[in-house]
Amino acid sequence: MKVETLETTLRNVMKSIKELDKGLAFLNSKVKELKKLEKDWYGIEEDPQGAEDTRQVLIDFLQSELGIKDASDIEFQRVHRIGHFNQQASKPQQTIAHFLCN
């Protein structure tokens, strides 16, 4: 009877380990995605009046242009634009994003 109990416990533990491995693989893939994304962004449209929430603009871009459905769950260390807003500029200001990875 004890052997059967140990075998059942071992099977349950092995199943839990497999589930944890899957979760770890998923998290590792998300970290790799974020590291690829952590860069300078060019061409993200600006608010014509210069009043914007740059973080929200980037989230909207990630969702609409890159298809990242859960982009609003991403934690950013910092998101900002480079330079001063210029309504006459031919291109949007560069956006810088640093992601917070624990």
Image (spheres, rainbow, N blue to C red):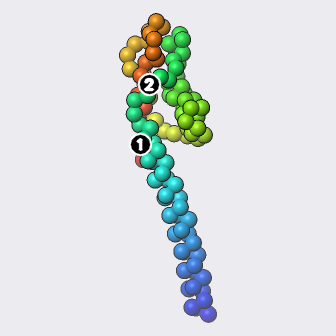
Residue occupying the point 49% across, 58% down:
25
Label 1: which secondary element: helix
- Asked whether, in this view, residue 1 is left or right of residue 39, the answer is right
In the rendered view, tell whether residue 40 sits above or below residue 9: above
Q: Earlier in the sequence, mark 1 or mark 2?
A: 1
Q: Position of residue 41 (x, y in %)?
A: 43, 28
User: Counting other residues with Cα less than 10 Å from the Cα at mark 1, is it few (<14), some (14-19), or many (20 or more)?
Assistant: few
Kindly tell me whether residue 100 is visible in this rendering. Answer: no
Query: Dividing the picture into quarters, in which one does residue 4 lie?
Result: bottom right
Residue occupying the point 46% across, 6% down:
88
Kindly tell me whether residue 49 is visible in this rendering. Answer: yes
Q: Position of residue 20 (x, y in %)?
A: 52, 64
- Asked whether, in this view, residue 30 is left or right of residue 60, the answer is left
- C-alpha gap between disc 1 and disc 2: 17 Å
Of 60 and 5, nearer the camera is 60
Label 2: which secondary element: loop
- Asked whether, in this view, residue 4 is left or right of residue 20, the answer is right
Query: Dividing the picture into quarters, in which one does residue 61 lie?
Result: top right
Residue 42, disc: 2
Amino acid tagged 1? Lys
Amino acid tagged 2? Tyr
In the rendered view, tell whether residue 44 sits above or below residue 30: above
Residue 13, disc: none
Q: Position of residue 43 (x, y in %)?
A: 47, 22
In the rendered view, tell whether residue 23 sits above or below residue 60: below
Q: Position of residue 67 (x, y in %)?
A: 58, 38
- Residue pointed to by mark 1: 35
Of 56 and 66, nearer the camera is 66
The residue positioned farthest toward the bottom in the image shown: 1
